[in-house]
């Protein structure tokens, strides 16, 4: 009996040891798998590092690429497109102006009443209209007839019961956010459609002509004064509220920037003449690229699988369209390394199923149990309940991806400031020390949900600006949120370029020929028309003359090589 007891005891001990061995083995394997998952995170952290030294390299690269893009067509990944906007709102604009914002499957019409004092928008009315699906693939006439009809109904509704205004053609700012080759302030040729549109007869056509022909057919007395994109509208709105605004940045689903450049710095357009000496340049900065950008394997895979590989590299690292998908790719990789999320969810393999608003919600979840993280994993990715430790891991992934994006966006902004000498360094060719440079107050208008709604992104961006510029310089740089640059900004530019504006109606830039010895401020000249030469008794040289036709007085002259006009 004693031997039996001993045998049973030994057997139990052996089983216990075996069970313990299995348990220990599982724990060891689990630890190894967890170590691999943590290794994925550490690899991501290292690849996304943006120390201030690297950010300053990105700043320099941005400024150099801007310079190259201004020097020649195709000289840079940055297109540096001329907008033909050479003067911005001053705050003195008075009257009622309209805007049409067409940039997607909806369009908006606006009516803005300006009071003549800076930031004095007396009233604004907005109407959003979805575009019927069939019109997105129909004809240009069908599309613009529908838009013109909506505009006419909007005007009639808004103007009913109001005091009749003096007889004058209504003026409109047209914000058209599709690829366009801009020809002048109020004309541009459609290069190609995007965003689901496929109206073949419109490609290669001048878009303002098509709009105005539809307005005529509808019987609406309205004229498109400007053709702009949304970044130029944002800059106009920023400038209207604050005269120190020099650039505009949009960081939302997509991203872009524009800024005010000296006309003589736009080398690829030698002989470019503007009354202000400046012009707004649309950078198309989403296409910026530099070897200094911290690119990961997830970025490479996303780019290769995108509809536009090797294009929009900067946008794919910083904009709301892509941040969610980068996070999804990291989670997928982790789930393949270890079953910390349970069986690999098929939804993890669906591109763009995890969107950036969900990333922001997980990142900013401050509940002790991270309930919002668990909810999004469950409802969006069909990942069942996971441990708190795993939820914290997901939050950390969101943090790393967002931190990199915000800091790179900040470096892009400082790159613009460096190019125009507003970063405290003296500009792209400046060799002065920061102590030798007196900083001016500098405002950058900024729009886009990624910046305005994602608090941690915004905080990281501001933190990076302070690091790059230094606290002494950073206090002079102000990021000001604007609202609806594509709409209100378009109306403001219509006011700036109004044919009824005193500044625009009385001054015209023309070519003049007269002798150097004749008095430049009291030369009796008559108006012979825009883009025409005015000849005096002696014609040894050509000059640019800004002439006030109410007094036939030359206000300014300088040597030029081309005939130009500040009117369309």
Image: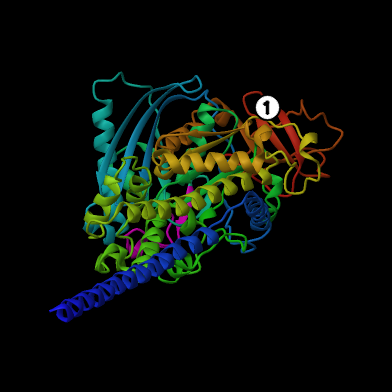
Can you give x and y, in whole percent of width and height, for residue 171 in the image?
41, 35
- The residue shown at (64%, 45%) is 564
Residue 484: name its quadrant.
Answer: top left
Can you give x and y, in whole percent of width and height, for residue 504 in the image?
56, 31
Q: Residues within 10 Å of mark 1 (few under 14, many from 20)?
A: some
Q: Nearer the viewer, residue 110 or 415?
A: 415
Q: Is residue 83 left or right of residue 213?
A: right
Residue topped by disc 1: 552
Q: Is residue 273 visible?
A: no
Is 507 placed above or below 263 here? above
Is most of the magenta stretch helix, strand or loop? Answer: loop
Q: Is residue 482 left or right of residue 78?
A: left
Residue 197 drawn in magenta: yes
Q: Quadrant of the N terminus?
A: bottom left
Q: Is residue 166 left or right of residue 385?
A: right
Residue 436: name its quadrant.
Answer: top right
- The residue shown at (32%, 60%) is 197
Q: Nearer the viewer, residue 316 or 142?
A: 316
- The residue shown at (36%, 41%) is 100
Can you give x and y, in whole percent of width and height, for residue 289 in the image?
58, 61
* Secondary structure of residue under mark 1: loop
View extreme (front): residue: 2
Is 111 placed above or below 27 here? above
Can you give x and y, in whole percent of width and height, for residue 218 in the image?
27, 43
View extreme (left): residue: 1
Q: Nearer the viewer, residue 470 or 211?
A: 470
Range covered by the magenta-colored residues: 187-206
Residue 63 drawn in magenta: no
* Label tally: 1
């Amino acid at each position: 009996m004693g031997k039996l007891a001993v045998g049973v005891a030994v057997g139990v001990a052996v089983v216990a040891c075996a069970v313990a061995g299995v348990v220990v083995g599982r724990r060891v394997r689990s630890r190894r798998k967890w170590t691999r998952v943590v290794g994925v995170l550490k690899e991501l952290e290292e690849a996304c590092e943006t120390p201030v030294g690297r950010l300053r390299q990105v700043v320099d690269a941005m400024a150099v690429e801007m310079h190259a893009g201004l020097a020649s067509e195709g000289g840079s990944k940055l297109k540096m497109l001329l907008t033909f906007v050479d003067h911005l709102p001053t705050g003195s604009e008075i009257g009622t102006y309209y805007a049409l914002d067409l940039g997607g499957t909806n369009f908006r019409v606006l009516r803005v009443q300006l009071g003549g004092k800076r930031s004095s928008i007396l009233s604004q009315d907005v109407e959003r209209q979805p575009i019927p699906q069939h019109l997105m693939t129909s004809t240009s006439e069908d599309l613009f007839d529908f838009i013109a009809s909506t505009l006419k109904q909007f005007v009639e509704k808004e103007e009913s019961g109001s005091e009749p205004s003096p007889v004058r053609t209504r003026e409109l700012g047209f914000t058209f956010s599709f690829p366009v080759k801009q020809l002048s302030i109020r004309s541009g040729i459609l290069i190609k459609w995007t965003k689901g549109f496929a109206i073949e007869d419109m490609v290669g056509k001048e878009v303002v002509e098509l709009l105005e022909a539809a307005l005529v057919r509808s019987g609406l007395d309205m004229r498109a004064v400007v053709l702009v994109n949304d970044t130029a509208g944002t800059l106009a709105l920023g400038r209207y509220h604050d005269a120190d605004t020099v650039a505009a940045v949009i960081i939302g689903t997509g991203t872009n920037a524009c800024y005010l450049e000296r006309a003589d710095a736009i080398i690829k357009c030698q002989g470019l003449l503007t009354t202000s000496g400046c012009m707004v340049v649309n950078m198309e900065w989403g296409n910026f690229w530099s070897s200094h950008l911290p690119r990961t394997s997830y970025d490479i895979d996303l780019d290769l699988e995108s509809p536009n590989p090797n294009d929009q590299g900067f946008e794919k690292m910083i904009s709301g369209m892509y941040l969610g998908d980068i996070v999804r790719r990291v989670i997928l990789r982790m789930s393949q390394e270890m079953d910390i999320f349970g069986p690999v969810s098929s939804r993890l393999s669906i591109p763009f199923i995890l969107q950036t608003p969900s990333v922001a919600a997980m990142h900013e979840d401050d509940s002790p149990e991270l309930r919002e993280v668990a909810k999004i994993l469950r409802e969006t990715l069909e990942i069942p309940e996971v441990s708190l430790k795993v939820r914290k891991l997901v939050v950390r992934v969101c943090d790393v991806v967002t931190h990199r994006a915000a800091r790179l966006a900040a470096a892009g902004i400082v790159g613009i400031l460096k190019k125009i000498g507003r970063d405290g360094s003296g500009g792209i060719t400046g060799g002065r020390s920061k102590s030798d440079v007196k900083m001016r107050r500098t405002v950058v208008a900024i729009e886009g949900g990624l910046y305005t709604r994602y608090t941690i992104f915004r905080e990281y961006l501001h933190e990076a600006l302070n690091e790059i510029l230094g606290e002494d310089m950073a206090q002079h740089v102000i990021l000001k949120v604007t609202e609806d640059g594509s709409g209100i900004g378009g109306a403001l530019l219509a006011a700036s370029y109004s044919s009824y504006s005193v500044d625009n109606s009385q001054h015209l830039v023309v070519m003049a020929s007269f002798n150097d010895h004749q008095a430049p401020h009291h030369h009796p000249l008559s108006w012979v028309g825009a883009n025409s030469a005015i000849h005096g008794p002696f014609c040894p040289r050509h000059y640019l003359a800004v002439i006030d036709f109410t007094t036939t007085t030359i206000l300014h002259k300088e040597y030029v090589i081309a005939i130009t006009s500040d009117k369309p």
